[in-house]
Image: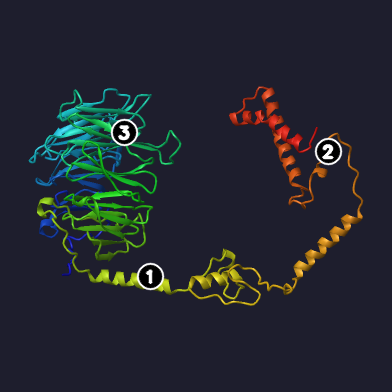
Amino acid sequence: MIQEYDDITPIPKAALECRTALYSPNGQYFAYTQPEEVVVLNTETKAQLYCKIDLKEVFDIFFSHNGTYLCLWCKPIQLNRENGTWNNNLKIFNLKTKKIIIEWSQKHQNGWRPQFTTNETIFAKSAANNKEIHFFEIKTDSHDLNISQPSHKFKVADPKIPYQTFQISPGLNPSVAIFLPEKSGKPASVLIYNIPNFKQPICSKNFFKAERCQLKWNAVGTALLALASTDHDSTNQSYYGETNLYLMGIAGSYDSRIDLKREGPIHDITWSPSSREFAVSYGYMPSETTFFDARGNAIHSLPTAPRNTILYSPHARFVLVAGFGNLQGTVDVYDRQNKFSKVVTFEATNTSVCEWSPCGRFILTATTSPRLRVDNGCKIWHASGKLVFLKEYSELYSIGWKPQTVDRFPPLKQLEPAPGAHISTKEFVAKKEAAATAAAQKPRGAYRPPHARGLSAGPTTLYQKEMESKLNGIPAPVKNGFNPSSGRARVVPGAAAPVEKESKSAAKNRKKREAKKEKDQESPAPEAAPTSAPSIAAQVPEVGLVLGGVSSLEEKKTRSLLKKLRAIEQLKMKQAVGEPLEDTQLSKIKKEDEIRRELNALGWSE
């Protein structure tokens, strides 16, 4: 059976520049931006127009959990420079009533998104320069909310230490986790409160070495992973700073630091959709991937490999462990319900996007721009590792599956056989196999230095000829007077050695050496100055000259020691005038006696 892949053209189709496009989390709506408006499509009717929102210069959009509200961040415009007022560029649009229910000014695009509870009855926003969090209660039929009158409010205990980030938990009884970075010797902390009770946290954790923190709740909102990191490693062992992982439960029954048995950065952390376990990829490459239960106990570790990405399938049946980014793109798929047995390994090079399909049977990998501006396209793999679809684009900016609930797909008892490959995939595989065959048949050459490349008529050394013959499987020809295995001339016992013809340059150099030798023999030797110690030249055996003008190895060492002695004298002068010296300079001064003993052993005296 061959799967069909039909294009669905939205009505209306985007005609101008589209800055961003996004599905709602429940997959009911799809929205994209245009310079003068935002278009919302109903995907339940094959991308038919649902509504248009007349807003100019919308740069980013965001849906609430159930797709009831669409948040829009527009271009900020300063209305009055004297009093510093800006336009209300952040708006929340109710898709049921098709009206804007609240708006306020948010100058910075970083961290602009408001957060909603799962049932969409409360949303929260930052306020007072990250010293307060305002919570607003909303109803589906709400027409207007007052931004100056929040329903609930959280304030930091110390106004000098504002919070850095917060995260509302999923689930019917929502909590909020708040991270306060370390400052002025005080440790960093993660506080968890039940909404809207902010008098006393239900769980808290204090720790150092935390300039930033990534907060990740499990699917039911009962446990939190806090990944704390710093830019600078105090042990000077890592260029990428230092990372630590902490686990916290909302009941306060446990909070602990996850003990990782290998040193190095943490590359990825992810919760299982079942919320009963999580996985961590950590350590210097090749990294290690370890699975922990909900209490932080290690239950399984995979073999070390260059991997930095972990993705659970929606039913938590399979686990994808891959190495993307600056790694080669190897993907391993493991069967979680069969004692982590490996299902398949395949290569997905240059991958910038990787996602499981909602049914948990297919994997999407894609290369997007501007991460990479070549080879843009998407590939769809069956969980068994078979490539079933491929499509190339001149420029691909964003891609993803349409979100759908797991309830629509039955859980996998056994992985079905992969469907037949699409025609585009067959062409790609044939092209790849042809390229591999051509590369294997192409004669390989030995290494040539850059200055000798591209010279087809240039001379080739015997070594290069021999190496090229070995690479291409051709036996090297045996020549008289030359042994190809050792590279030396053949010598026949009892026969005279072969006479090699001397080149012009070799003859010229030989004549110069002979003339210099005759001149040295004719010139009288200078009288040696009387010294108490024996002469250095008298102690040196006749082993020939040393390069650089030094007549012996002993004299070369003597010069090196004298140079160190002069440097020590200069440091002692600096020390005498009161100039501060470093530890390395003081250690040099302490070695003066040792250097003088070595000089005396070589026959040198002052």
Q: Which of the two labelled residues, at mark 3 and mark 1, occupies the earlier sequence position?
A: 3
Front residue of 15/480: it is 480
Residue 534: % across, % down? 83, 38
Residue type, numbered disc 2? Pro
**Residue at 76%, 47% in the rendered image:** 552
Cβ atoms under marks 3 and 1 closer than 8 Å: no
Question: Which comes sooner in the sequence, label 3 or label 2?
Answer: 3
Circle 3: is it few (<14), some (14-19), or many (20+) Cα within 10 Å?
few
- Name the residue located 24 percent from the left edge and 49 percent from the top edge: 56
Q: Based on the displayed image, in which of its 4 quarters is residue 391 positioned?
A: bottom left
Viewer-side residue, 552 vs 408? 552
Q: Nearer the viewer, mark 2 or mark 1?
A: 2
Labels 2 and 1 touching (C-beta < 8 A) = no
- Judged by depth in the image, the label closer to the viewer, 3 or 2, is 2
Q: Which mark is residue 534?
A: 2
Which residue: 15% across, 70% down?
1
State the separation of the CA atoms marked 2 and 1.
72 Å
In terms of secondary structure, where does tag 3 sit? Answer: loop
- The residue singled out by tag 3 in the image is 84
Q: Secondary structure at mark 2?
A: loop
Foreground mark, 3 or 1, reads: 1
Distance of label 3 from label 2 (alpha carbons): 88 Å
Q: Which residue is mark 1?
A: 436
